[in-house]
Image: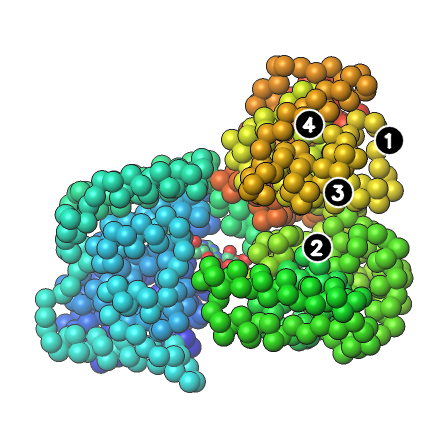
Amino acid sequence: MTPPQDHKKEPVQLLNHGSIAVIFIDNPPVNALSHAVRQGIVSCLKAAETDNNVDAIVVSCSGRTFIAGADISEFGQPALEPHLPDVLAQLDECSKPIIAALFGTVLGGGFEVALSCHYRVALTNTNLGLPEVTLGLIPGAGGTQLLPRLAGVEIALQMITSGKAETAKKLFEHGVIDLLVEQGPINPGETLLQQAIVFAQNIAKKGEKIRRVSEISIHNNEHHSELFDQWRKKLAKKARGQNAPQCCINSIENAVLLPFNEGKKREREFFITCRDSSQSVAMRHAFFAERRAAKLPAAYDKTQNVTLLPIKQVAIVGAGTMGGGIAMCFANAGLSVILLEMSEDNLTRGLLAIRKRFEQALNRGLIDHVQLEQRMSLIVGTCNYEDLSEVDLVVEAAFETMAVKRQIFATLDQVCKLEAILASNTSYLDINEIAQSTARSHKVLGMHFFAPANIMKLLEVVCADDTDEQTLKTVMALGKKLGKISVAVGVCYGFVGNRMYSCYGREANMLLLEGASPDHIDTAMKNWGMAMGPLAVTDMSGIDIAYKARQENPALKQDPLYFRAADLMVEAGRLGQKTGAGFYRYDSDARTPQVDERVLAVFSNEAKILGVVQRGDITEKEIQNRLVFALINEGARILAEGIATKASDIDAIWLNGYGFPRHLGGPMCYADEIGIDTVVEGIKLYQQQGNGLYWHTAQLLEQLIVSGEKLSQQ
Ligand code: 3HC
């Protein structure tokens, strides 16, 4: 919405349109409810309410969206009056009708503002939601009391516990929106404001009793205690270890059981407990870490206003699982893709596999038939490199061997236009070396997608020595377009994520030789909060993949214990799920791991040969600490080397690529939470216990203990 002519720097203004007053909020970028905005709303509301010429009030916003929530950056600071619930109580209680004019993303406190108004007018493409639970919070300004009153308990449970937004169209059907407005052809915001003013004039003319959501009573038959218990059970499983979802359910139940003001009071208590919890601190850290990742460090950001290269057509080399997933990513974002394979057979197989995966999305209701066909039509196959001459970007997703990659890049360099960016999806290999096989090393970088590439949010953008700023910035912006969290990282074996993962995996492998079972290790890590245990993950992705990658590592450890357990599995042909056996066996259901006693015998036998003493006293805590401290220690090294330029980038990588529990904020944030001295003590203990080859405290950790600074702030 365009700011009006008399727009000044105040974040909230009162504008008059005849007998309708407009409370106009202008607090870029997303009109968050900062202290100044809350103050502005209160004073404008007071002025409008006491002005005899005003019959009704419209709440409207400037910019790209109606209010997208409370100002999250204020949560760690002392709360200043007026508090949001008090502001919203004033809207609710106002003696003149208030109409919210909604567009963009109406989220959290923004949705609560809308629910506290008496009527809601929205553009059809508006999204509305209460995402507080994703920040370890519950809606704290009436959301859990107002939404069930207006939309019913079921919708409130769904929306508030998932944090997912719904469209205005859907919420119109549930009585949340009173009028839907089609987006105007020229200035959608203006159209909306005009319609909201007309709506307000009509309401004022009718002079009916004001409809306050707080006064709607919820029918008692909507309260089945079993319904709430079912949700508690479901969420205890789905959001394992998280407190906020349970608080959301309890608070929604209060909406049914208690008068509005009492329910709201309890909601506030829940909110404050959640806000001050370490889980919410971690999840807010995660929110900002993901956004900070887009901001490049000074070394990568020397030139202002770099013109980004237009990326309209891309090519993918390799139609395997990874290449297919990457092709889907681009097609999902509306870009046309040429998929290159070496043989017609492989190409046909690859295209069929892509169709199958789109069909799975169709069956899950994520896309419709038209979208499926549209996306498939964007992907064309070829076996001819010459067809890549006009593409703007190539992503190579072929075999993970340097010789193959070098040859592919040399060919691409010959056939592709000079401006084309050449990217490798390698998970480990040296991008600098790959770049040297071209005459355009400034246009070469890594785009490391995570499997399944069409679903996983993470994209490591690997900046090689020669990669220029235009190339890097173009790919970072492209990542955003693909819906990815893009994190710029430097070159080293495994980059950030896999280099750290190899330390985590190393400890899991050591523990197998020392007598812990795969199930013991995986259960410990799941209990700690990881989405999956490390050995079940390896079985799923194929134990041979990391095995081959280790063979390609020029600095592979010569230690006979290093990943010995995994190597034994590969040598025995147990490659994981795909061969029906790996660290586990897979019987009738090819995906459910079953404990296999035989592997324990293999490990204990090998332990004897290698002189490793097997212990029966390995605890869950030891497993968790060894795996997680190994991660933290390597993360600190990566940071000191500048491979990651911010600790929060490491957290963003682990949260979005490796199933690290969001309520623990990422490995760097978690280290701060438990104390860096605790981590260092653990590292020293494991060093004394005989694992001196790997357990050396990263210098940065020692320095931070001395300076008292936080790791996650580095
Ligand atoms: N508070 C403070 N800053 C916020 C913010 C918020 N609620 N929402 C977004 N921002 C900032 C971002 O940090 C970013 O800042 P930067 O440019 O300096 O990095 C900027 O706004 C733009 O954000 P995005 O990059 O995310 O922009 P997008 O266009 O991709 O997305 C959005 C916009 C959908 C609004 C997304 O930012 C979002 O989901 N925001 C969070 C919404 C939210 O969680 N609201 C609930 C807050 S808690 C609450 O309201 C409690 C209440 O119940 C009491």
Q: Amino acid at mark 1?
A: Gln
User: Which one is in front, 544 or 580?
Assistant: 580
Q: Position of residue 383 (x, y in %)?
A: 79, 71
What is the x, y in percent for residue 257?
17, 42
- C-alpha gap between disc 4 and disc 1: 24 Å
Identified by mark 4, the residue type is Val
Q: How is the image coloured?
A: rainbow
Say whether marks 2 and 1 touch (CB < 8 Å). no
Using the image, tell me which numbered label, if any, was put on residue 599. Answer: 4
Residue 457: which disc? Answer: none
Q: Which mark is residue 558?
A: 1
The residue that disc 2 covers is 448
- Label 3 and label 4: CA atoms lie apart by 16 Å
Q: Crowdedness of circle 2 by 10 Å Cα count: few (<14), some, many (20+)?
A: many
Distance, label 3 to label 2, CA atoms, is: 19 Å
Ligand 1 within 8 Å of the CB at mark 4: no
Q: Nearer the viewer, mark 1 or mark 3?
A: 3
Mark closest to the chain's N terminus, 2 or 1: 2
Q: Earlier in the sequence, mark 4 or mark 1?
A: 1
> Which quadrant: the C terminus?
top right
Contact, CB < 8 Å: mark 4 with mark 1? Answer: no
Q: Which of 660/329 is in front? A: 329
Place of residue 112 in the rendered image (x, y in percent of width and height, measured from the top left):
30, 56
Report the amino acid beneath label 2: His
Tell me the element at label 2.
Answer: strand
Instruction: Assign a secondary structure to mark 3.
Output: helix
